[in-house]
Image (tube, grey):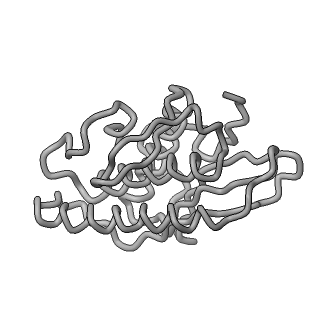
Amino acid sequence: MEAIARGAPDERSRKEPTPTEALLEFLEAAVHRILASRRLYPLAVFERRKKYEIPTHMCRHPDVNEWVVQALRAAQPFVESGEAEHIALVILDSDTNDVLESHGFRLGHVSSKPLSDVEYAAVALGFRNCLIKMGAANALMPPLPDSATFTLRVCTKPEADPNPNPNPNPNPNADANPDAHL
């Protein structure tokens, strides 16, 4: 998941990732793409990187990168257990807390079996196509107000365990509102 944050080349850093690992790596790239394209931070704090053989943006600020990684790590147990229905990057008006936009990713069953090279190539192609479509869609959207902020939300199935994480101190920032002005 942290491969894009560390500036790793556009290759799998592990042999045979699980579908959850591949999904979370994609979500990390997607979150950064949304943050850049919706101008939630100045474009100057982003750099262009390649992911899935296409150029995308990655925030250079370590606090933003850490927040994204930690939020996705907090979501991981829900994805692995099959309890997550979708994950959304929600853009809010910080003055009113009204939802301005929600960029959601609906999840189906995510296997725990490692992906073969052929399976990973097919999944990566799907992720690539999604990032391309996101870029086109975001270009057509109106600008956000200066008061816009964001959070990452994991929406679970009604019967989901509210705390599937075996860690007794789960990340309290999984649905945090990163108001830090970077």
Q: Residue at x 69, y 54 (%)?
A: 91
| Quadrant (top left/top right/bottom left/bottom right) for the C terminus | top right
Answer yes or no: is residue 121 visible: yes
Residue 19's x, y, as percent? 27, 59
Q: Nearer the viewer, residue 155 or 68?
A: 68
Q: Is residue 79 above or below residue 36?
A: below
Q: Residue at x 50, y 50 (%)?
A: 33
Judged left or right of residue 18, residue 103 is: right
Residue 166's x, y, as percent? 41, 43
Q: Is residue 68 above or below residue 136?
A: above
Judged left or right of residue 13, residue 40 is: right
Answer yes or no: is residue 169 visible: no
Q: How many marks?
A: 0
Residue 169's x, y, as percent? 52, 34
| Quadrant (top left/top right/bottom left/bottom right) for the N terminus | top left
Q: Residue at x 50, y 61 (%)?
A: 135
Q: Residue at x 42, y 61 (%)?
A: 131
Residue 64's x, y, as percent? 56, 33
